[in-house]
Image (spheres, rainbow, N blue to C red):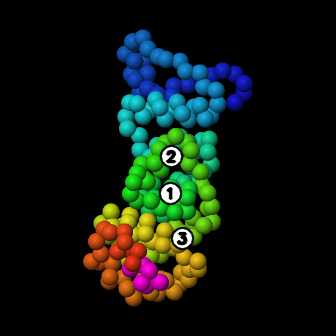
Amino acid sequence: IDGNKTTYIIDGQHLYHALIRAGIDIPYTEIIIKDNVDLAEHLALLNNSSKSWSMLDYITVWANVNKDYIRLNKFYNTYDVELCQLADILMNNSCTFYSGGAGSISRVIKTGDFKIDDEKRAVFLLNCVTDALKIVKRMDRMSNKLFIVTYVNFMNSLNSYNHKQFMANLKLNKHKFVAITQDPEEYKKLLKSIS
């Protein structure tokens, strides 16, 4: 910050203090950090090598250099949607379920490449999902994810969407979601029939 070189411990703080207390020489590797992005990359690499990081750990580290990660964390604490689905909606205003969708979103988050595309549209979609999930009561995890994927992509396929009317129709037909299987086509048909 002030132009002076400073040394920080970015991994192994507990070991460092234990060795100090025991009077043992401290082995270390010095890494020269060029900028905040370089620091975030090194933190993610070093800390993930000793223990498995959660997605929230990556979000925390990348939030130091990318404001979209701060927004992602805020939205994660606001909406009751799994993190990868949430990130997918924020990035693409759509949602994937199969064929590595969540895996590719995870990689994007881990590498620091997460970017929010159209936040206003994403917030609208997330608010609609939240409203729909209040009507279609929580199902098992996979059915819930499938419902969110199908609903978001269904909304995106429409030329016009009347949320108030759709929620009223959903209320009248919520019983139909109880017996539905985990077939995306069944969800699409059901959503289309009540729109």
| Residue placed under numbered mark 2 in the picture | 109
User: Residue at the spot x=64%, y=26% of the render?
Assistant: 34
* Residue 65 at x, y percent in the picture: 62, 41
* Residue 49 at x, y percent in the picture: 40, 30
- Cα separation, mark 1 vs mark 3, equals 14 Å
Amino acid at the residue labelled 1: Asp
* Residue 71 at x, y percent in the picture: 58, 54
* Residue 143 at x, y percent in the picture: 33, 67
Circle 1 Cα neighbour tier, 10 Å, few/some/many (<14 / 14–19 / ≥20): many
| Span highlighted in magenta in the image | 190-195
**Disc 2 on helix, strand or loop?**
helix
Q: Is residue 56 left or right of residue 187?
A: right
The image quadrant of residue 37 is: top right
Of badges 2 and 3, the one in the foreground is: 3
User: Residue at the spot x=61%, y=57% of the render?
Assistant: 117
**121 or 186: nearer the viewer:** 186
Amino acid at the residue labelled 2: Ile
Figure check: 121 above or below 195: above
- Cα separation, mark 2 vs mark 1, equals 10 Å
